[in-house]
Each structure stands twice: as structure tokens, then as C-alpha cells.
Image (cartoon, helix red, strand yellow):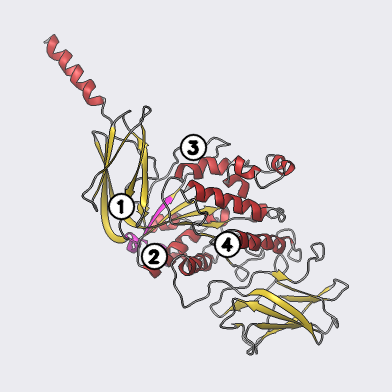
Amino acid sequence: MKRLLILALVGGCAVSSFAKVVLPNILGSNMVIQQQADVNFWGTANPNTKVSVKTSWSNQEVETKSDAQGNWSVKVPTPEASYEQHTITISDGMPLTLSNVLIGDVWICAGQSNMEMPMHGNNSQAIEGSLSHILNGSALANKMRFFTVERVRSYNDELKNCGGQWECASPESVSDFSAVGFFFGYTLSNALDIPVGLIAADWGDTKVEAWMPLDALKECVSAEQYETKHSNHWCKPSEMYCGMIAPIREFTAKGFIWYQGESNLKDIDHYDTMLAQMVKRWRSDWGDKDNSMPFYFVQIAPYIYRGSKEISYPLFIEAQVRAADIIPNSGMATTTDIGEEYSIHPAKKNEVGQRLGALALKQTYGKGGFEPVGPRLKSYEIKDSKMILTMSHADQGMNPWTLVPLIGFEIAGSDKVFYPAKAWTSDKPKEVITVWSDEVKDPVAVRYAFRNFIPANLTNTYGIPAAPFRTDDWDDVK
């Protein structure tokens, strides 16, 4: 009897030495994995043990071996996107099977509160048009999947795992997910007819420096700025990067969308370089050696800030425009037309997501038939007491058309006093805007939408608005 008991105990120990592989939460059932890529899989298993990955789309197993601490990683090739539901079995002797996996495109959706704002809205702040999409959520179960990274701070200590789980689209999951992320993914899924996986990593009132590691920040700010950034905000540099980006950076993705900047409004002299450095590091983290993964971001929307007539907002937009110019393979979705004077969280998130989607469809997927960039100042001249502006991204002309006045323009002479201006588009040539005021006989400068909040209506013929711009460099003139 004693011998049988000993054998049973030994046998039990032998079985317990085999444990199922443990995966990070970002790898799970219901996920979307990147199509036509060598997709990263990683986790822990028994030390020094063979780990195999078997997928339902391939007859070939992919094998690797865990190290002395049980850590392992492997790349698994994926086919073209489809709506076929797949399984993935990972084993070190005891199998772990992931089910209901789709193959499509994966995008990271990051930023602060306007990216965080869910489809059900914030308290007393609605998302325009969200109800129909929430009610229709279940119909999107094989088109859209969501993962929201748990909001965790970690100062200069990169976490290996994060909270969260993959969810199929449903009324409940759509309601809780980032509205900007949802509308972006919805635009792509419909246009491309493929599954889209969206990973939301967002936290309200965070600064760009919180989303990048300390060594990356040191490369783009002065020593004084670096110290100041550790003392003037509720979160420190690197905290969101270490807590929320580091755990997901191995998950193979197509690209990034970003909506952030309100908390960096005063950093007009170096926001562009910080954002560019953050993007460079993220791309490197995701295995992009060429610094070329798509990165599309949102122009923060007009808002009163410290006064509607102040100009802190348009000065910051200039930094965002510079960022778009220096970050390879990037683009900025403009929002000049959808701001709300007394709400920093505009309700029109559909337009934001759709415009981000238009940038991606044009620049990443090569789709045509539309222009995703609003009119942008190319050059100007002074003629007969008027300012003649020539705009780019206006091949089809601009809106409103020539018989409807433009609003949002101001004009000044050498005294630097700005007056509301009259402005009209032109049929011939269609890329020209004429601006003048009876109060200014000898104009030298024009501004458009250059206040924290001012009504403005210049768009291209697809409804994409122009960002605030000016011809002067008078930062201290309001």
C-alpha cells in the first residue's frame, strides 16, 4: 500500500511539472492578428522546453525552445485577411488553444482624453450618432475586435504584461470602446472589407512625454526641460510608456493613430520634436527599422482654453503641423470645424475617426477618389490692397464656393492690429483665396482661424477643413 502511495505521489509530481504555457493578456482568443506578416508570439513555459505553435491555417508547426527562466518567443507567418475563424494551439507538453481568431489589420489607438472618450460618452458629454453603431454592434462581431489596455502607471520600469482582454464587437463592447478608435476601425473595415483589430492605450490629461521612455525624452529636450517635466504634472515622463505601451509592443501591428496634445499646449517650441521622437521609438519597439510604420494623428480641436480670443491654441497647432512635416509617413486629421467653445471633448468623433481613416486609406492602402488633407497655405502676395493666398491640396477647388463668403479670416497692416476680413474663394484659379478689409489699406499679414475659438469654414470639396494658419510670425500679437 505504501509503495502504491509513493508511486502515486511521484506520478502526480511528474504530471505537475508540465504546466500550460502562459501568454500575455494581449495574446488571446477573439483577437485579430496582422495579415501577411511574421507575427510575434511570446510567453512563458517550463524552462528549457520545446514550445510548439500550431495554427488552423497551416499544416506546419512552428517550434522554439524556452530559456532557463521559461521565456520563449517565436514568429508565425500569417496569410491574407479573411473572416474565417481560426484556432491557435501553443504547447510545451500541455496544449493551450486560442479560438475565434481573425486575420486582418491591427492598429494601435493611443492618446489622452479625446482618444479615451468611449462611444457612450462622458458624464453629460455625448458622442454624436453613437447609438445606431452601439445597437448594431453584434453585426460587427467578425469585422471588429477590441482590446483596451488597463490604465497603469510605472515610472521607468517597463512592465511585461497588462490588464485587458480581446472582445468581439457587441453593443456592450462598442459602447465601452474609444469612439475615435471605433470610427477609424469602422471606416477601414468597410472600405477594405477585412477584419480590423483595435488596441486602445489611452489616459486623459496625459502629456506626450509620459508615453515615451526617459532615454528617448532626453534626446529631444534640454536638461532644464527634462527636470521641469518631472515636477509640473500629475504623471511623470515614461509612466504610460512603461505601464501601457511596453507590454503590447511585441504585438505585431499595421500602424498607429494618436489623439493627444491638449496637456502640452504650452510646449509650442518642442512638442513637434518630442512627438517625432516618440514615434521613432514606438516604431523601433514594433520592429520597424526604417521608421516608416503609418502614424496618423489628430489636430486638437478649438476650445476656449484661457480665453476664446487668445492664440495659445493656434500656436500649438503650428507645432502639430511641423510634426506632420518631420515625421515620415504621417498625417494630421484636421478638426477646425468641429470644436466646441465650452467643451474640450467635442461630440463629433465620427468625423475624427473618418478623417484618420481617409488618411490611412490614401497613404497606407493606396485608395483614391478623395483628398484627405485640407487646404494649406502655399504662398501669398499683396496686390491692390488685398492679400492673395495660393493654397495646396485644392485640386478640386475649395468650399464654400465663390458666391459664399469665407469666415475666420483676419488681416493686419504694419501696425499689427488685426481686423475681421472679407474673403472669397475663386473659380479661376481655383486654388486662390482673396482677403481684404476696408479698415486695412496696406495689408501685410493674414490669419485664418487663429484664435482659441473662432467660427471658420474653409474646407476642400470633400469637407476636410484647413488647419489654422498665418502669414506673420508675431507670436506676441493677438
466 drawn magenta = no
How far across and how far down the image is residue 370, in percent? 49, 76
142 drawn magenta = yes
Please rate how many residues cluster around mark 1, counting C-alpha atoms within 10 Å: few if below 14, some from 14 to 19, many from 20. many
Alpha-carbon span between mark 3 and mark 2? 31 Å
Contact (CB < 8 A) between labels 2 and 4?
no
> Is residue 143 rendered to the left or right of residue 358?
left
Q: Secondary structure at mark 4?
A: strand
Which quadrant is home to the N terminus?
A: top left
Q: Residue furthest top?
A: 2
How far across and how far down the image is residue 392, in percent? 62, 76
According to the picture, the residue beneath numbered tag 1 turns out to be 101
Q: Which residues are magenta?
A: 132-147
Please rate how many residues cluster around mark 3, counting C-alpha atoms within 10 Å: few if below 14, some from 14 to 19, many from 20. some
According to the picture, the residue beneath numbered tag 2 turns out to be 189
Alpha-carbon span between mark 1 and mark 3? 25 Å
Q: Amino acid at mark 4?
A: Val
How far across and how far down the image is residue 35, in percent? 35, 57
- The residue at the point 56 percent across, 51 percent down is 280
Q: Residue furthest right?
A: 415
According to the picture, the residue beneath numbered tag 4 turns out to be 298
Q: Reading the chain from its start, which is encountered first: label 3 or label 2?
A: 3
